[in-house]
Amino acid sequence: DFWLWQALWPRFRPRIVIVEYVSMLGDMDIVNRYLPGGLSFTGRTMRALPLFGSSLRALTNLAHVKGYRLAKVASTYDAIFVREDLWPAEAESELPRLPTHPSVLALLE
């Protein structure tokens, strides 16, 4: 979702963007690597799976660069962003405190 949103801007500027994030990445600013051929789990170990996707913090940072504000975290994996011309700064939601899953911490050691 991170790479798609980045590629669509500035040509497309919808009023609302709903993006999926990986909650197990916690409060860290983590973005998966872009793979032009897409994801393939052939030959990969389960150990690498937690590093797919993007953290909520990374998506919120991208949103700010693009002129969006975090309106709501709708579930444990969806974030709703609204264009800043439609959503005042004082109404922006705070990032929830998310614990980083131990398997992610182990991969980053």
Image (spheres, rainbow, N blue to C red):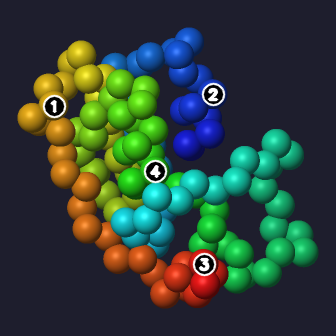
- Closest to the camera, between mark 2 and mark 3, is 3
Nearer-N-terminus badge (2/1): 2
3 and 4 marks in contact (CB < 8 Å): no
Camera-nearest residue between 23 and 100: 100
Within-10-Å neighbours for mark 3: few <14, some 14–19, many 20+: few
Give residue 60's quadrant in the image. Answer: top left
Nearer-N-terminus badge (4/2): 2
Residue 16: tell me if it is visible: no
Mark seen at residue 58 = 4
Question: How many angstroms separate mark 2 from mark 3 (CA)?
Answer: 27 Å
Which residue is disc 3 drawn over? 108
Q: Amino acid at mark 1?
A: Ala
Which residue is disc 1 drawn over? 89
Which residue is disc 2 drawn over? 7
Residue depicted at x 21% and y 19%: 86
In percent of width and height, residue 27 lies at 37, 66
3 and 1 marks in contact (CB < 8 Å): no
Question: How many angstroms separate mark 4 from mark 1 (CA)?
Answer: 19 Å
Q: Amino acid at mark 3?
A: Leu
In percent of width and height, residue 51 lies at 63, 68
